[in-house]
Image: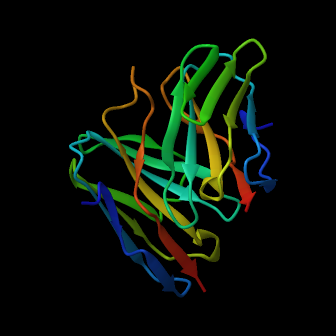
Amino acid sequence: QKEVEQDPGPLSVPEGAIVSLNCTYSNSAFQYFMWYRQYSRKGPELLMYTYSSGNKEDGRFTAQVDKSSKYISLFIRDSQPSDSATYLCAMTDSNYQLIWGAGTKLIIKP
Amino acid sequence: DTAVSQTPKYLVTQMGNDKSIKCEQNLGHDTMYWYKQDSKKFLKIMFSYNNKELIINETVPNRFSPKSPDKAHLNLHINSLELGDSAVYFCASSQDLLQGNTGELFFGEGSRLTVL
């Protein structure tokens, strides 16, 4: 079993929909939780990071962490075709090493 | 002005050949990385250097040899290429060894290696 599980998708939704992307993890020692976005033929770029359980909002994006359930989510409101990308979750272990999910491919249909 | 740049962007080569990928960052970061991303988009760390010193050396065949001439450069040389080496190789940098910070890595655009 991988330390971080993420459904690879693809997840296809119509423009304007609310998108929910999720990762589960097994190691309770994970500390920081990140979401990276990767456009086709580009490198990943950091979208959001959180440390504690709860929600963090940035514009149309909300990152949610539930440490008791070992579950993190990224919500995208009013989704746009430009949000079409692969979204990778990542988290740091007790040695501050980054552990990555496999990425979910998101397609927003106009 | 590109923060993390890697060259070449594309490599197509025959099995058994040797190839190199170069990476440079102009962010003033202390730590640089090489990642391999397979066809299923899974990112796997290969090496990490901090101030020219090797920090992470994952289970990678010794045909892969990184070299950091200074903290702004991290190159990757691959000997005797095999079909399974086909992937996208990403260079990345971070301010430090992620201790106490946000875990933000800055990635290059990737070097797509195809071994025939």
With B19 as the anchor, is A52 left or right in this view?
right
Pinpoint residue B58: horizontal percent, then vertical percent.
52, 45
Q: Residue at x 68, y 38 (%)?
A: A77
Pinpoint residue B27: horizontal percent, then vertical percent.
24, 46
Pinpoint residue A101: horizontal percent, then vertical percent.
67, 42
Q: Residue at x 58, y 14 (%)?
A: A52
Q: Residue at x 54, y 18 (%)?
A: A51
Determine the image quadrant of residue B31.
top left
With A3 as the anchor, is B25 left or right in this view?
left
Q: Is residue B93 above or below residue B110?
A: above
Determine the image quadrant of residue A67.
top right
Q: Nearer the viewer, residue B37 or B84?
A: B37
> Which quadrant: the N terminus of chain B?
bottom left
With B73 as the anchor, is A80 left or right in this view?
right
Query: What's the image's color scheme?
Result: rainbow
Q: Nearer the viewer, residue B103 or A59?
A: A59
Q: Is residue B36 above or below residue B17?
A: above
Pinpoint residue B40: horizontal percent, then vertical percent.
71, 60
> Which quadrant: the C terminus of chain B?
bottom right
Determine the image quadrant of residue A12.
bottom right
Q: Residue at x 43, y 40 (%)?
A: B56
The tally of labels here is 0
Q: Is residue A18 visible?
A: yes
Q: Nearer the viewer, residue A77 or A21?
A: A77
Q: Is residue A30 visible?
A: no
